[in-house]
Amino acid sequence: MSETFYEVMRRQGITRRSFMKYCSLTAAALGLGPAFAPKIAHAMETKPRIPVIWLHGLECTCCSESFIRSAHPLAKDVILSMVSLDYDSLVMAAAGVQAEAIIEETIEKYDGNFLLAVEGNPPLNQDGMSCIIGGKPFVEQLTHTAKHCKAIISWGSCASYGCVQAAKPNPTRATPVHKVVHGKPIIKVPGCPPIAEVMTGVLTYMVTFDRLPQLDRQGRPKMFYSQRIHDKCYRRPHFDAGQFVESWDDEGARKGYCLYKVGCKGPTTYNACSTIRWNEGTSFPIQAGHGCIGCSEDGFWDKGSWYARLTDIKQFGVERNADQVGGTAAAVVGAATAAHIAASAVKRAMQKGDQNS
Amino acid sequence: MTGKAVLKSEPAVYVYEAPVRLWHWVNALSITVLCISGYFIGKPLPSVPGEASENFLLGYIRFAHFAAGYIFAIGFLFRIYWALVGNDHARQIFVLPLFNRSWWGGVWHEIKWYSFVAREPRKYTGHNPLAVLTMHLMLVWGTVFMIVTGFALYGEGTGMGSWQYDWFSSWVIPLFGQSQDVHTWHRLVMWYIICFIIVHVYVAIREDIMSRQSLVSSMISGWRTFKDNREVDDGH
Amino acid sequence: MSLTSTPNGFSLDSGGRRVVVDPITRIEGHMRCEVNVDDNNIIRNAVSTGTMWRGLEVILKGRDPRDAWAFVERICGVCTGCHALASVRAVEDALDIRIPPNAHLIREMMAKTLQVHDHVVHFYHLHALDWVNPINTLKADPKATSLLQQSVSPHHPLSSPGYFRDIQTRIRKFVESGQLGPFKNGYWDNPAYKLSPEADLMALAHYLEALDLQKDFVKVHTVFGGKNPHPNYLVGGVPCAINMDDALAAGAPLNMERLNFVMSRIQEMVDFCNNVYVPDVIAIASFYKDWLYGGGLGAKNVMDYGAYPKVNYDKSTDQLPGGVILNGNWDEIMPVDPRDAEQVQEFVAHSWYSYPDDNAGLHPWDGVTEPNYTLGPKAKGTATDIRQVDEEAKYSWIKAPRWRGHAVEVGPLSRYTLAYAQGVEYVQQQVQRSVAAFNQLAATEVGAKTVLQSTIGRTLARALEAQYCADMMVDDWNELMGNIKAGDLHTANMEKWDPSSWPAQAKGVGTVAAPRGALGHWIKISDGRIENYQCVVPTTWNGSPRDPAGNIGAFEASLLNTPMERPEEPVEILRSLHSFDPCLACATHVMGEDGEELCEVQVR
């Protein structure tokens, strides 16, 4: 047995007293009486690390890369002390048969008790062979492993929504996890990639409290995805004041004005970028001068240019935005009305002529 | 030739009760404010100079939009209530007699009238069938759509736990896929309603002049007056 | 069939035992490798297969060229940003947009930060376990480890016996838990591991240090691009405007505090490369002095487009000059022109795509790709359960790019070979210093060519390149400050931002020295929209299957003639393949013009 949660917490500077307080709070939060606090303490002092299988489908590995950027907790502490990352083709020492054997062993030893983290998604065209693991389609590995897991974490926009390879026309028919796996709780942590501390935050919440985080209707943890970037953006005062970047590198850009007019998707994107920010709180896209591209939203690749405020509507064949479509319609209706006025006037004049004759 | 038969007008009928008339004009005003403010929310005016703390231009525009939105929504709720308790005419634009053949005949006749094929319009105490159809499809459903999507977008700002979020945003946003799509459709339907307004205003004035009953004045006084004394063509 | 000779001078023997490794782990993306070993367990034939395909180029067609960088950036989250950079360069080349000097310097710092970060993460977290045995650290003496650390790198502050004892204790607890996590099912009793327990412990300590520090390196991207992975780029410059001392500078993307922050991160990179990374590679290499295998194609044909110009748009000022070397002749450097239809061509005879003529090559501007997933007659298994591929037929999702018909190796080793051969002083000194240090530690007398032209050489070149990039960034930062002092705050050229200012037809190329080698993006723009987009990426060059003439690519060549201690434990295969830092998502995103025919997407 390696370090327990208790040892990790102690090592991270938490006193025995605070630990016990934490256990009673946890008991209370779980709706249990104070008598359960020592039991929780005991479990946290002795519990083995929960096994995690981390599968990679069609993806770009940005989620893993983001994960290892976590500053609190450090990625090394997550891997060495909080979970047991038994299978992750990106970091594991074993390869080939020795690697594949780990999945079967985990299923056998921890059936229904391990977490499945999925990065990327399975393609269904080409018989699923656009993503091959061990000579077989990735979708087989995914559904097989998912059948035995406790819960699934869909890392990033690929696993949650499909992301870039599922952008139109989706040539490989890349399909998000929740459309091929049913009957298991799925936690979506969207973003391309998600913020590192959000990823480790979701994972440590699950490990520490031994329960799933509260999810919104789209299956995202409420704790990180309940608010738009716009709502807590530091440039929001400039939005309300009506002060915008009109063009790149203009006066507004240098003064940190709102990027709304150059297409920032902050007002329509649910994520924690403006609050938790990126890379240990260093900055986030808007602070660095580029608008948000909405990477944690479903289908954000097909909502028109990063630099357009009004998004394209593809249903109208040629890509047009709402103002072009609606404005054209209104102009047509206006012109038709004018023509009708003229025709009515002519007709009335003719009728009057009839009556007078 | 029809004109020759007209000797005196039929007595006027009280059609639009005061609450309906009030709603009509309040609604017209709120839609005007909503369209103008909404247009500038999507396409803001050029930047204003000075400190952010001294300016609140887009803030005021958004405030106007939200205030008008509340008036628009509350007015619509009130209008539905009045459809239930008011006179027959108050119900007309909400319930279409879809299975009534002669009503569809009326729609067809109006289309012919507007295409200059029919020589004479029919005579109605209430709205003509084509008007009912247009108001139902464009105004009533357009209004429902705008209220639902509008509150869904508003709820995004008020946040989880607010009634706007719980009643609207929580299901409307996932239904469309994402917030950006709701914005796009909210704006598109604004143009749909603008199209309705263009037609509505034109037709009301045209009917006032060319049909056999009063239109614009009725929405002010409530009384429908007629230009001839023949039978009316609707059951109202 | 058994014995064949390839036109590029390798002999293959497909007799003997066939060993299959699928998946190859600790790489980006998905890959499979099959080798034939003879009676002495020496690899005599190697077959590498790219096992994923995403079709990004089809997705790009018809989109706004100014948006393309974000799509192609998602080709890869490991070498994050290099595709975005190649993309904005291709678009700017097509539309004849010149970016301001400040934008160039900022992009350079971002590109070089990526080099350092990617190389460090590759060496410690993807590659190290091929050389370092973490279980062996339990036998180490922390005091001796401390002495070793101080002798290898006297300036590294983390070197006390207590420090190493703490780490050893932590690893012991971890191992004793029975939950080995990423170390599970490793090949820890394989005699292929040669380090002393102390060297293992030192390397493992640095594995953990590097894991902590790499997250700080990328903060340079966070300042300039807002986030990492996948920072933001902009056609025409960079989106981070500069405001040094005007009102509201504190809320501007770049101000004094932000630039100081960047400088601190650059200094960390310089220190880590000097005190940890480069010394570690040399020290580990000295334990493997008898394992100088894996030179393969890198000893013969190497290529790069050239990178890091001191003066932007002047290739003659490249600090890592490009070119091609053939057949190991360092005296003749041939120029590379990515626009020349005769030079860079892609072949698909052994790839799961078809061309009108499978044996002809196509230049990327005219790239055609139609997926065609089939297995050859000698393949074993079924279409959805491959036991063994048939390398005489189609066997990979990777195309085979060639330079004038020659298979070439790309990557840090190629760039270093070219720079060394062209007399870049910094590089020559670095190499000579490293080889001397290696000879001293290993008590050998080998030359630069012997060390460089091996798996170890590939790993060393990567470390030296990281060190060079870290140093270059200091110059870039100083130059940026000089420009600002001279009053130049411009970061973007917006003259041709509006598509109405573009020609109806345009085409361009963007090249980047990506961490894994020469990267090129080719774009055709028609009426303001992308007409065709093709990327030829480093792992496509290195991981390429055979071409119609039978030339093998760099991955396959590097494995040949390597002895395996235990064929069922692929340590040596992983070691040489990892020395290329394969990036399969990059290599196999490819799909071209006719791809749509396949797109019968069934919407659920």
Image: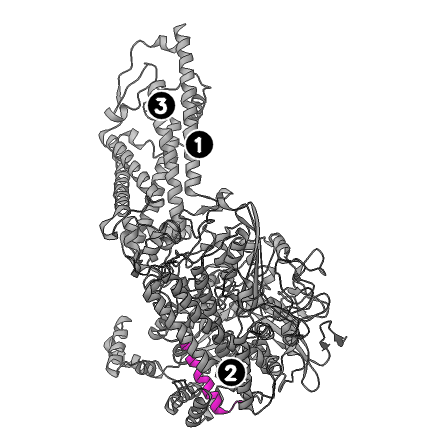
What residue type is disc 1 on? Val
Q: In screen coordinates, is C358 left or right of C60? A: right
Q: Chain of mark 2?
A: C
Q: Which mark is residue B234?
A: 3
Q: Is the C-beta separation of discs 3 and 1 under 8 Å?
A: no
Residue density around tag 2, few if under 14, some if 14–19, many if 20 or more, within 10 Å: many
Q: Secondary structure at mark 2?
A: helix
Q: Position of residue C581 (x, y in %)?
A: 55, 73
Q: Chain of mark 3?
A: B
Q: Position of residue B125 (x, y in %)?
A: 32, 23
Which span is picked out in magenta?
Answer: C193-213
What residue type is disc 3 on? Asp
State whether the magenta stretch is mostly helix, strand or loop: helix
Establish if C381 lies above or below C503: below
Which residue lies under the disc numbered 1? Answer: A332
Q: Chain of mark 1?
A: A
Q: In screen coordinates, is B92 left or right of A115? A: left
Query: Nearer the observer, disc 2 or disc 3?
Result: 2
Which residue lies under the disc numbered 2? Answer: C281
